[in-house]
Image (cartoon, rainbow, N blue to C red):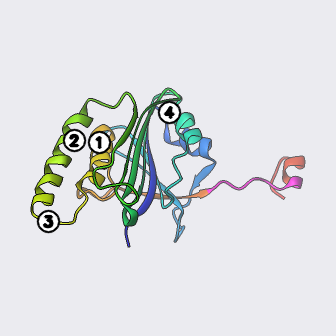
Amino acid sequence: MGLVAGWIAVRGMERDRILDALRFVEAPGATKPKASICDLPNGWSVLFATDFNFPTPERMALLSADGDAIAVSMEEHVMMVAVRGYRRGQAVFAIEHDGGSEDVRHIATAGKVPVEWAAILADANRKQDKADQQDIEVDHLFDAPLALAEALCGYRPDAEGPDLKMTPLAKKRSPSLLGRLFGGRA
């Protein structure tokens, strides 16, 4: 069984604004959180969820309103991965690999892909060529969008390195009807 995840890296929006925008609160005591957040040393904040569909276009536009956002949706067991980039609320690029239903060499792109992509894709194709020549069943192109995301924002959930402090999140609770009417929680 492989990792199923969706995550968004955000630069240009403070952590409190990110949480407010998505109606999340920090929940350090949560035992099985659906989402978590961490701040990277390079200025990016990462929202991580165990949900392939977490990085929606609406969330991406909202979180990139004042800067940049990079999103990854991945399902390792079906070899599906997509990376998308937004700037100032607008989609800039998208790259998708579907090695399960399509082909191990499948790559679809849209928009203006980052300059780093060409070298990353070439490296993945070289590795795939070598594996194919040796008759090894592996999908090196699955890693290419993940490598691009890491090159752009410095985060990859399966990369080795210093452990990051992920803070569990919970959905912000809305006050009850009486609480809204009388200005408190009822």
Quadrant of the rendered structure where residue 112 is?
Answer: top left
Say above or below: 170 vs 21: below
Lower sequence index among marks 2 and 4: 4
Quadrant of the rendered structure where residue 12 is?
Answer: top left
Quadrant of the rendered structure where residue 118 is?
Answer: top left
Say which of marks 3 and 4 sits in front.
3
Say above or below: 170 vs 7: below
Image spot of residue 56 (x, y percent): 55, 45
Kindly indicate whether the residue at mark 4 contacts the one at mark 2 (C-beta within 8 angstroms). no
According to the picture, the residue beneath numbered tag 3 turns out to be 135
Magenta span main SS = loop
According to the picture, the residue beneath numbered tag 4 turns out to be 64
Kindly indicate whether the residue at mark 1 contacts the one at mark 2 (C-beta within 8 angstroms). yes
- Indicate whether residue 147 is drawn in magenta: no
Say which of marks 2 and 1 sits in front.
2
- What residue appears at the point 78 percent right and 53 percent down from the top-left corner? 175
Task: Indicate the quadrant containing the C terminus: top left, top right, bottom left or bottom right.
Answer: bottom right
Task: Indicate the quadrant containing the N terminus: top left, top right, bottom left or bottom right.
Answer: bottom left
What is the CA distance from the residue labelled 2 to the residue labelled 1? 7 Å
Lower sequence index among marks 3 and 2: 2
Say which of marks 3 and 2 sits in front.
3
